[in-house]
Each structure stands twice: as C-alpha cells, then as structure tokens.
Amino acid sequence: MCKRKVLLCCFVMAIALVGYIFVRSAIAEVLFSDDFEKGNNWELVVKPQEKAEQFLVTNPVHGGKYALKNHLISGEICGFKKMLGLEVPAESITTLSFWYYVPSAEPVGNIIVRVRDMSLEFHDFYIQGDKINFDKWEFVSLNVSKDLTPPFVVGDMIVGIEIGNPNSHDNSILIIDDVILENKK
C-alpha cells in the first residue's frame, strides 16, 4: 500500500513538472543566456587611450560560481559587449534582463544598456548614478520595444548588446551576471 502511494506521488510530481516545462516553454523562449559559468566571450569596450581590464570573478557572484567584472583603470568609458545577430519576432515581447553589482564608494557615473539593430543604431537605457545601490546585487529587466530610447522595432534583428558605465572615473568597477534575452508570447 505504501509503495503505491509513493509511486502515485512520484507520477503526479512528474506530470506537474512536465506541465510546468510545457507552460514555461509556451510563455517564454530564451534567445540568449549567459551566466559566465562556461567562461567569458564578451568583448571589452574602452576607448583606445584608456586602460581597463575584464575578467571572471568568484566573489561577488549573483548565481553560480562566476560573474564578469570590468575594471576601468584610467579613463571614463568602459563596458561589456556581446555580438548576437538574433531576430526578434514581430508578435513578441522581448526582454533583456541581468544582475549588476557596484562595490561601495566606486566612482561610477551612469550604467547604460545598449541594444544595436541591423542599421547599427543604438537603443539606450540609462540607470542614473544616483539610483545605483552599492554593495548589493540589483536586477534590471527591460522591455526592448518600450524601455529603450529610441524604441527598438520588433521584427528587427538584435545585432548586439552592451552594458557599461560611461562617464565613470578612474578605478571604477562594474560586475554583471545572469544575462538573459527572451521572447514572451
């Protein structure tokens, strides 16, 4: 009798899991995801005369073992860039989300998120410097067609994304983790 209950319970849980996976896949399609667990294949964005470094760190991380850190040694612009080449279906809501961390008292200006389209035009979103919390992971989720300026046209292609800290100062640090670009239907 006890074995039957355990089997029945396992069967019900398996059906619930399959149902969740089916519903989740019907709701969202992940176009791109990077949690940096398999390494770093992002490019460093910096002016030629400036000095910066980019590397994986194990502390702090939002999830998993690694996050990606930018350290602007001298200059004012530093960022992460990932080339994608992904088409955005016209009937979808595309979101870009990620976590970022700025150590306390770091001289960071704003944080900018840029999406580049097929015509190589940038669509930007700014997190103002006075809205940045230090020593704390912060979550950002953007509707690509509504939250960026100018608005991104769904049906176009996302050539690449950039996350950076323009107007920063020498010795500024920005860490990102768990970057996801997905379509919600």
Image (cartoon, rainbow, N blue to C red):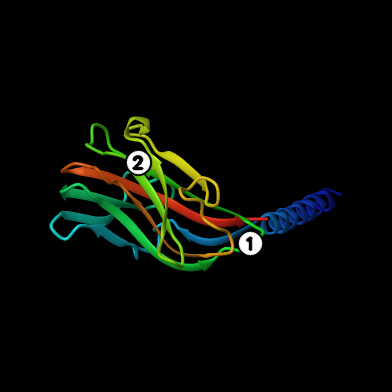
The residue under the point 26% across, 33% down is 104
Query: Quadrant location of the C terminus?
Result: bottom right
> Which amino acid type is shown beneath numbered disc 1?
Ala
Say which of marks 2 and 1 sits in front: 1
Q: Which tag, 2 or 1, sits closer to the chain's start?
A: 1
Sort mark 1 into few (<14), some (14-19) or many (20+) by Cα contacts within 10 Å: few
Label for residue 132?
none
Q: Residue at x 46, y 67 (%)?
A: 118
2 and 1 marks in contact (CB < 8 Å):
no
Residue nearest the viewer, comparing 8 with 42: 42
The image position of residue 92, as x and y in percent, is: 64, 57
The image shows residue 59 at horizontal and vertical percentages of: 31, 45
Q: Position of residue 50 (x, y in %)?
A: 15, 54
User: How many labels, in total?
Assistant: 2
Expressed as whole percent of the image width and height from the top left, the position of residue 84 reads 44, 67
Residue at the spot 34% in from the left edge and 65% down from the top edge? 41
Q: Quadrant of residue 31?
A: bottom right
Name the amino acid type tagged 2.
Answer: Tyr
Q: Is residue 92 left or right of residue 43?
A: right
User: Left of 36 or right of it: where is 168?
Assistant: left
Q: Is residue 81 above or below residue 151?
A: below
Q: Nearer the viewer, residue 157 or 11?
A: 157
Secondary-structure class at tag 1: loop
**Disc 1 target residue:** 90
Query: Label 2, label 1: how many angstroms apart (C-alpha)?
Result: 33 Å
**SS category of the residue bearing label 2:** strand
Mark 2 crowd level (few <14, some 14–19, many ≥20, 10 Å Cα): many
Which residue lies under the disc numbered 2?
Answer: 101
